[in-house]
């Protein structure tokens, strides 16, 4: 059982997964590799001079997997509340988690199936990206009518993960690293 199940492997989903896993929550990402980022070229993303979207995505995947995020190449067909958490059905198999982050771009079908409240055509979330269902988060294009940007989606995923971490730790949690942290994680190869 994962602590966090993320549906979608674009910038929002992988950012949520990275933040959660890096800070001790077992995280599984369901990714069909259908993200719009494959059609993008990034030169409006802070810190990225100019990079093909697919190349950026591969870097983000390696980073998340490097911290232990499990990526499952499967399409999620259902998500439902179960006990204290959620059950996600993908390719006929059920997976359980304490939290679920929906990061499926503009496809809002799973949020609708789960019973999340909508504001018009978009999923209604609070500032932490939590939906009307406690422990369920929605990110990116599914919560924004026209603001479809990789950097916004990544921020949404990070906000969702930080709220999950705050809930788990029982206090406001901040994911802020210093050079010594990077040296400990990467063995003195930080920034290389």
Image (cartoon, rainbow, N blue to C red):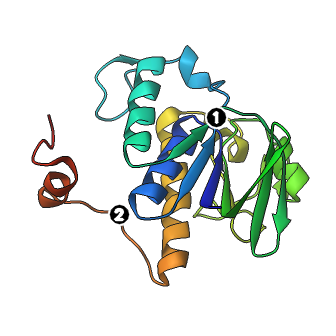
Q: Secondary structure at mark 2?
A: loop
Question: Badge 1: how crowded within 10 Å, few (<14), some, or many (20+)?
Answer: many
**Where does residue 42 sit, x and y in percent of width and height?**
42, 22
Where does label 1 land, which residue? Answer: 31
Residue at 52% across, 59% down: 26
Is residue 114 placed above or below 74 in the rendered structure? Answer: below
Residue at 57% across, 34% down: 10
Q: Nearer the viewer, residue 156 or 165?
A: 165
Residue at 19% across, 53% down: 182
**Where does residue 103 sit, x and y in percent of width and height?**
65, 43
Q: Is any atom of residue 153 visible in this view?
A: no
Where does label 2 land, which residue? Answer: 175
Q: Secondary structure at mark 1?
A: loop
Query: Which one is closest to the eye, mark 1 or mark 2?
Result: 1
The C terminus lies in quadrant: top left
Q: Is residue 3 left or right of residue 123?
A: left
């Amino acid at each position: 059982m994962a602590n966090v199940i993320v549906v979608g492997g674009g910038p929002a989903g992988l950012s949520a997964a990275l933040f959660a896993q890096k800070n001790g929550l077992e995280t599984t990402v369901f990714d069909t590799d259908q993200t719009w980022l494959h059609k993008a070229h990034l030169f409006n993303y802070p810190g990225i001079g100019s990079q093909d979207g697919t190349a950026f995505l591969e870097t983000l995947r390696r980073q998340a997997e490097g911290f232990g995020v499990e990526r499952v190449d499967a399409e999620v067909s259902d998500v439902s509340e179960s006990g204290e958490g959620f059950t996600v059905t993908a390719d006929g198999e059920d997976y359980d988690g304490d939290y679920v982050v929906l990061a499926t771009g503009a496809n809002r079908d799973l949020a609708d199936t789960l019973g999340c409240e909508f504001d018009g055509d978009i999923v209604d979330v609070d500032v932490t990206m939590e939906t009307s269902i406690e422990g369920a988060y929605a990110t990116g294009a599914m919560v924004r009518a026209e603001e479809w940007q990789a950097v916004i989606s990544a921020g949404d995923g990070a906000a969702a993960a930080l709220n999950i971490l705050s809930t788990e730790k029982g206090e406001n949690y901040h994911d802020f690293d210093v050079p010594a942290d990077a040296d400990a994680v990467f063995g003195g190869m930080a920034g290389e």
